[in-house]
Image: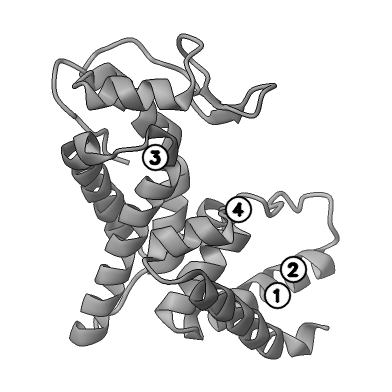
Amino acid sequence: MTELVVGGDVDGSPELGDTTPRPDAAGATRLSGGPDFSETTWVSRAQDGDPSAFEHLVRAYEAELFRLAYRMLNDRGEAEDTIQETFVVVWRQLPTLNDAQAFRAWIYHIATRRCLNVLRRRSRQRTEVTRGDDFEAETLPHTRTDDSGDSPETAVTTAAQRQSLEDVLGTLPHEQQACWVLHELHDLTYPEIAYATGVPLSTVRGRIARARQNLAKGMAAWR
């Protein structure tokens, strides 16, 4: 993805390393690859205008948000543009975030809404999208993609099953797909998904239930 410049001289700065959010012993989220700050501390520093703190947050979230956008949009270019725009919006609106602990749900809210806007615009324009060859690997990080130890028959069957899931998932209404992806692939809780999508908790439960039903019907041949 194109590196986001958020202000200040970040080009040529030292590599910050892996900044994936990790829970500490007390359950607080921490970002590795820098001082032992909790995520809320990085958010607070970024809210005060510290570009290096925001860069930590970008590095921590860009991969998983890209997987979200790629999964929903099925198009690498649009996914990259959408996440780039997401971080620009986050940087501009970060001072308005009242609770630093809500940052994760808030950034997912912005990214999800922008993805849904792209899908709605695409539906009006009826445009075609292009998947990259590595669509599966980019969007299904929890799925083992190294099938070198499998027999050719097993590898073919696995690939066909994954493709079938992709096809069925693509037929779901956008809102159902978004809720299912956020829950199943990004481990967001129902309240977090409600916040991310801007709908009541009961609506989230209903959409995920219907998505599961539709996916089960579509994948019935694989049972």
Q: Residues within 10 Å of mark 4 (few under 14, many from 20)?
A: few
Crowd tier of the residue under label 2, counting other residues whose Cα lies within 10 Å: few below 14, some 14–19, many 20 or above: some
Of residue 21 and residue 131, the one placed in the foreground of this image is 21
Q: Earlier in the sequence, mark 3 or mark 4?
A: 3
Q: Which residue is mark 3?
A: 103
- Residue at (32%, 70%) from the top-left corner? 116
Residue 148 location in percent, x, y? 77, 50
**Residue type at numbered disc 1:** Gln
The answer to whether residue 118 is left or right of residue 26 is left
Q: Secondary structure at mark 2?
A: helix
The answer to whether mark 4 and mark 1 are in CB contact below 8 A is no
Label 3–label 4 contact, CB within 8 A: no
Q: Which residue is mark 1?
A: 161
Q: Secondary structure at mark 4?
A: loop
Which residue, given by chain and number where applicable, does mark 2 sit on?
158
Picture coordinates of residue 91, whole percent (x, y): 21, 36
Q: Position of residue 45 (x, y in %)?
A: 30, 19
Q: Residues within 10 Å of mark 3 (few under 14, many from 20)?
A: some
Looking at the rendered structure, the secondary structure element under dot 3 is helix
Where on the picture, by quarter, is residue 99?
top left
Q: Give the residue drawn at x 53%, y 23%.
A: 30
Towards the viewer: 211 or 163: 211
- Please determine whether, in this image, residue 219 is positioned above or below residue 180: below
The amino acid type found where label 4 is placed reads Asp
Report the side of 206 relative to 142 (left or right): left
State the mark number for residue 188: none
Query: What residue is shown with label 4?
Result: 187
Q: Which comes sooner in the sequence, label 4 or label 1? A: 1
Find the distance from the CA under tag 1 to the CA under tag 3. Answer: 36 Å
How many discs mark residues in the rendered view?
A: 4
How many residues crowd mark 1 within 10 Å: few (<14), some (14–19), many (20+)? some
